[in-house]
Image (cartoon, rainbow, N blue to C red):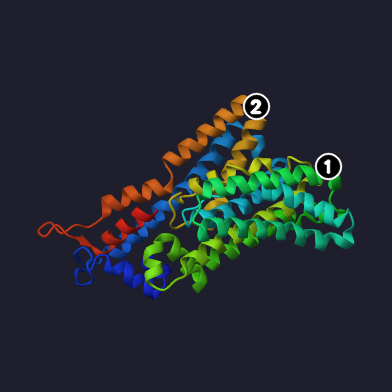
Amino acid sequence: MLLGVLPPGFRRLVTAAGNPARGGAPRTSGRSAPLVASAVVAARFVPIWLATAALFVVAAIIAPNALKSTSWAFVLPSMTILAIAALGQMLVIMHAGIDLSTPGVISLGGNFLVGVSAGSNHRLALGILACIGIGALAGLVNGIFVAILRLNPLIVTLAVGQILLAWTVRYSRSVTNQSSVPEALSTWASHKPLGISAVFWTGAAITLAVALMLRYAAPGRRFQAVGANPRAAWMAGLQVRSHVVFAYVAAGTLYGVAAVLLAGFRISIDPAFGAAYLLAPIAAVVIAGASLSGGLASATSTWMAALALTLLTQMLLILGLSTAMQYVVFGAAIIVGMLISGDRLAALLGRVLRPVDATAGVQTEVGAYSEVTENTS
């Protein structure tokens, strides 16, 4: 059941929304409730998988070169880096936030990696720690401003991102000066276990770990519960603000990991390093079925959305479209993806399938729960 992802205390509060004895709306029972709940959840995350499959079919017809091994050598590492950044954005969006500091974190993190390591393989570990550490620190600053001081996440993260970009320019001019990453990192990134980039395997492992943590671990279920309904989670005894701060810290850490992978893939670092990761991670999360107002999200669907966006970009390049037309097609694809996103379809399906008692005009328990999730996501 959908309620199975929530802690027992939070499940009782959500269920109470449809219980007259607890001040909620009247409800009736029905054996179809679990099936309806499962259908609503599936409708949220299935569309991106179907859309990606359709994109593969279109690519095979109009741009078959996009599906060749030479193309995948670029697509898989690129989509992996986007997916890792999107996973961080997903954790923030699950708590009705947004993070526009992503380019700043990735840019400064990449430059820190090069500057701290100084091109030496012996200092590579220290450079990686510095890169990931700057991401975690930026996330902590964002989390404190958003969760503790109650400032607008859009403004806060944009300001923090601009500060980080300014420091990136200064640091790159005085320290890195377009230096290359240590050879050990670039060699590792070019290695291909089973014929596939090591960057891809690393990203796949991280995505699987995040998905399992959110689905099966108690802290992950509490994390989802807070995002689904902060007020009910607070009444159940969960520390809402701590979870929001953690979301931003975890997001910043993932941005740091993405910066490490991007540095190994690109080898050279410049002030614009990471500039492409402002809106693409947000688009991937929303297209994957998450809602900008918070609620449930899927790590694997976010991964698939990153693949779809990267493959679309590769198709446009192979077709030889001008840069202006590439932006037009890419932007139109994102708009269409949001119009038919799983979040909108899940809300529609919840209204259509919600069982109603014809005589009393009351909702079932699942109907009440669907209403709760719609209002919070």
The residue at the point 37 percent across, 47 percent down is: 345
Is residue 121 at all visible to an observer of this figure?
Answer: yes
Q: Is residue 240 left or right of residue 61?
A: left
The residue at the point 41 percent across, 62 percent down is: 230
Residue 323, disc: 2
Kind of residue sitting beneath label 1: Arg
Name the residue nearer the viewer: 155 or 111: 155
Above or below, 191 against 59 in this view is: below
Q: Which structural element holds mark 2?
A: helix
Q: Of discs 2 and 1, which sits in the foreground?
A: 1
Give the x, y percent position of residue 137.
Answer: 67, 59
**Badge 2: residue crowd in 10 Å (few <14, some 14–19, many ≥20):** few
Above or below, 38 against 290 in this view is: below
Give the x, y percent position of residue 205.
Answer: 64, 62
Residues at marks 2 and 1 touching, judged by CB atoms closer than 8 Å: no
Above or below, 165 against 295 in this view is: above
Q: Which residue is mark 1?
A: 173
Above or below, 20 against 138 in this view is: below
Q: Is residue 360 left or right of residue 64?
A: left
Residue 294, disc: none
